[in-house]
Image (tube, helix red, strand yellow):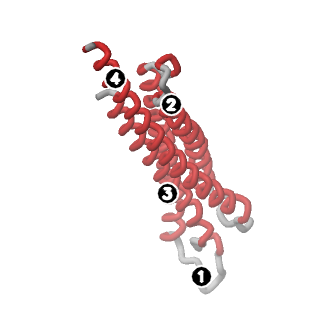
Amino acid sequence: MSEQLDNQSTSSKVRSIGQNFRFTGWISFVLQLVLGVVSSLLLLVFVVFRPPGTTSNNPETNFGIFLAICGLVALGVSIYLAFRCKNIGRQLQSNNPNNRPRKIETVKVLQLALIVNLAGMLLTLLGAQAIVGSLVVKAVSSPAATNQFFDPTRIISGQDMFVVQANTNTITAHFAGLVASIWLLNRITR
């Protein structure tokens, strides 16, 4: 009799964890997906529609854009892992204990999500540093307009700010993935 009550309490605990996984997985998935799509569109607008000769010859900006794209690729993996957490939650809520994933497998998915989000955040932060650094150099270097000529490459345009906004959105998305993974890891290891 005591064993049956223990199995019921374990089952309700697993179902509660499953509900946490589904809810947190969905929130993380949607938040990261929206921020990732917005970041991708902003980067696409910056790369495709920038005026010729403005920042295309700046290696710092180009390297920053490359790192930003790498951060977006890592965000794509993180979005997949958030979707997977939602599916793990559904499996944990199953009435059949054989359909439930093992704890070690679930912890490994969360650890992978942590690593992917940390790596993506690092890449995106490095990209943001390169881009902002090139914009600072552009802003503090010789004036854009002098008595002799006008140099449009010295002006920080609104398009330059697109890539900064894209990086900020990507960092926010990785942060959301980190928070969700840490919270779920805390729930499952209690």
Q: Residue at x 39, y 44 (%)?
A: 179
Q: Is residue 183 visible?
A: yes
Against 108, residue 119 (above or below) is below
In this rendering, the label closer to the viewer, 4 or 2: 4
Q: Pointers 4 and 3 in contact (CB under 8 A)?
A: no
Against 152, residue 124 (above or below) is above
Q: Which residue is mark 1?
A: 145
Q: Which residue is mark 3?
A: 168
Name the one closer to the observer, 16 or 49. 16
Marked residue nearer the N-terminal end (1 or 3)? 1
Three-letter code, disc 3: Thr
Question: How much space separates mark 4 and mark 3, taking CA atoms?
Answer: 46 Å
In this rendering, the label closer to the viewer, 4 or 3: 4
Marked residue nearer the N-terminal end (2 or 1)? 2
Quadrant in which residue 83 is drawn? top right
Question: How much space separates mark 2 and mark 1, taking CA atoms?
Answer: 59 Å
Q: Pointers 4 and 1 in contact (CB under 8 A)?
A: no
Q: Secondary structure at mark 3?
A: helix
Quadrant in which residue 73 is drawn? top right
Question: How much space separates mark 4 and mark 2, taking CA atoms?
Answer: 20 Å
Question: How much space separates mark 1 and mark 3, taking CA atoms?
Answer: 30 Å
Where residue 63 appears, x then y in whole percent?
Answer: 60, 49
Q: Residue at x 43, y 47 (%)?
A: 175
Q: Which residue is mark 2?
A: 88
Asked whether, in this view, residue 8 is left or right of residue 45, the answer is left
Marked residue nearer the N-terminal end (4 or 2)? 4
Name the one closer to the observer, 46 or 97. 97
Q: Residues within 10 Å of mark 1 (few under 14, many from 20)?
A: few
Q: Which residue is mark 4?
A: 8
